[in-house]
Amino acid sequence: MYHPVEIAEITEKTVCENNRRRYYRFRPARFYGGISTADCVGCCLRCVFCWSWNIVARPEEYGNLYAPEEVARRLVNIAKKKRLNQMRISGNEPTLCREHLINVLKLIPEDYLFILETNGILIGNDRTYAEELSAFHNLYVRVSLKGTCEEEFSRLTGSVPEGFQLQLRALEFLRDSGVRVHPASMISFSPCENIKALKKRLRAIDPAFEDFEVEELILYPAVEERLKKMKLRYFTGYRPDRIPAEQI
């Protein structure tokens, strides 16, 4: 097992340099009703269901280094061309290279909504990260929980179980800092009792968090093959009252 904060420190040495960060593409995307997207390189988790596994595993082989000014310029240009009012950094984990991210956010015009999709590990490890993010009033943070509990988190990411607590702590720190935030959770590997238990834990942090966003497995061919090799059971077609009978 590994500790995700340690992996973050190692990965940053590969994907960050002099306030620049590696990105492998810039694009408009259909999510959130349309959003300008910069896909970054580098993550501190190794999720078995990750659609960009190759990039996560070998970040030194992908992308080019971009300064914050270039990232912001490309995001704004895409948004203007496609008439979009939202933007994000996606692909891998955007909270790596903290100084770079903060500088990108400073350059985003306030009339655009910036959605920060994160696993929350680095924010949960350092409260000041959440405090620094609170300066951006056009920011919305979506914390993606990897499973519903410590055991699932460790099984799905290969990380120490304590990493799940960092994810929950990120929600707490962001809420306390006045940042707009909401949780999502990958539940395709979770029995009903674990989903119910997660709802209870999230409600204890903030009643609004109980109604978390459900993330479901997308069976890209490479993802499906990896899950079969690991003999992991999963399901799709989530319903809140039961787990579907069709399982692998």
Image: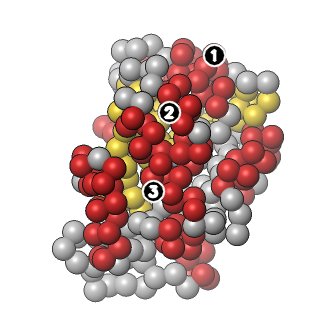
Real-space CA distance between mark 2 and mark 1, rounded to the nearest whole angstrom: 22 Å
**In the drawing, what numbered circle is on residue 189?**
none
Residue topped by disc 3: 145
Q: Is residue 90 above or below residue 119?
A: above
Work out whether residue 193 or residue 140 is closer to the camera in this orientation and state it: 193
Colour setting: secondary structure
Give the residue displayed 59% in from the left and 39% down from the top. 126
Q: Secondary structure at mark 3?
A: strand
Q: Secondary structure at mark 1?
A: helix
Where is residue 191, by image quadrant?
Answer: bottom left
Q: Is residue 208 above or below residue 204?
A: above
Identify residue type, mark 1: Glu
Q: Secondary structure at mark 2?
A: helix
Identify residue type, mark 3: Leu
Circles 2 and 3: CB atoms closer than 8 Å = no
**In the drawing, what numbered circle is on residue 130?**
2
Q: For mark 2, does the 10 Å Cα neighbourhood hold few (<14), some (14 to 19), or many (20 or more) residues? A: many
| Foreground: disc 3 or disc 1 | 3
